[in-house]
Image (cartoon, rainbow, N blue to C red):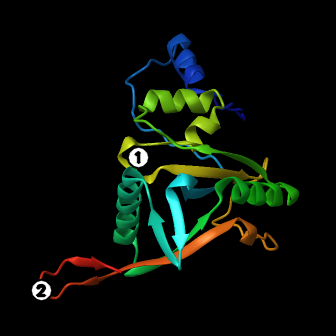
Amino acid sequence: MEKNIKGPASLDEIVRRTISSNSGKLICETSDFSVRIDGYICCFYLLPKMDVLFTNDSLSVKNIESRKSLAIFLEKFLEDSETNYFYVGIYDAKILCNLIMNAMENKGYKCKSGMVKYTDVDEASKISQFNNGDFRAIAFEKSTKYSYQKEYRIWIYKPNETAEGYIEESGIGIGSSLYGTFCYDYIMDPGTGSRVHQ
């Protein structure tokens, strides 16, 4: 005899079935929960344009708070890097995001964008967001320990398609949004062993 098993649609349905079933009971609650939302995220550090000035191929950040925040971000990024340097491109955010999103939408993708909200959301809230289809909240929320990133994201996905490891698209010109570039690196001071920034 063949049995058909229908999967539950949500956590609430699992609880309802378990409690109402004559043959089963709720044994315990679990904090283990994983979810997959297919798509790609482009992440950017957001720095107010009025605080940035490029002169003679050098970058000047006029606002002291913005300068400190940027320094913390660059240092943490360098710590996670496998090299002692990296190149930074500063773009006009509005122009850049419009160029990327318009080009990707023309290639059949859907795009959402916005600032990341830094909050420590508990597991029950994450499950509730997933069950309610609130994928934007999931894609645009991060733990408060990452708040130094001041992140702006573009979430790119193809409806009803599984995301692969990466996407590769050509023909997207972003040069018109470029404001300036610089190389961020350091050398070690042989006397103290500490970093000296270039």
Residue 191: give its label.
Answer: 2
Look at mark 1 in the image and give the residue it sits on.
Answer: 147
Q: Residue at x 54, y 70 (%)?
A: 54
Location of residue 139 in the rendering, given as x and y in whole percent from the top left corner: 58, 44
State which quarter of the image contains the N terminus. top right
Location of residue 30 in the rendering, given as x and y in whole percent from the top left corner: 39, 31
Looking at the picture, tell me which residue is in the foreground, 180 or 40. 180
Q: Residue at x 35, y 66 (%)?
A: 75
Q: Is residue 15 left or right of residue 92?
A: left
- 2 or 1: tag closer to the N-terminus: 1
Q: Is residue 172 left or right of residue 11?
A: right
Quadrant in the picture for residue 72:
bottom left
Disc 2 residue type?
Gly
Q: Is residue 92 above or below residue 148?
A: below
**Residue count near mark 2 (Cα–Cα under 10 Å), binned few <14, some 14–19, many ≥20:** few
Q: Residue at x 43, y 19 (%)?
A: 26
Residue at the outermost bottom position? 190
Mark 1 lies on a secondary structure that is helix
State which quarter of the image contains the C terminus. bottom left
**Front position among marks 2 and 1:** 2
Looking at the picture, tell me which residue is in the foreground, 179 or 3. 179
Residue 188 visible within the image: yes
Measure the C-alpha gap from mark 2 to mark 1. 34 Å
Location of residue 25 in the rendering, given as x and y in whole percent from the top left corner: 45, 17
Disc 1 residue type?
Ser
Quadrant in the picture for residue 129:
top right
Looking at the picture, tell me which residue is in the foreground, 14 or 52. 52
Residue 115: give its label.
Answer: none
Q: Is residue 90 left or right of residue 142?
A: right
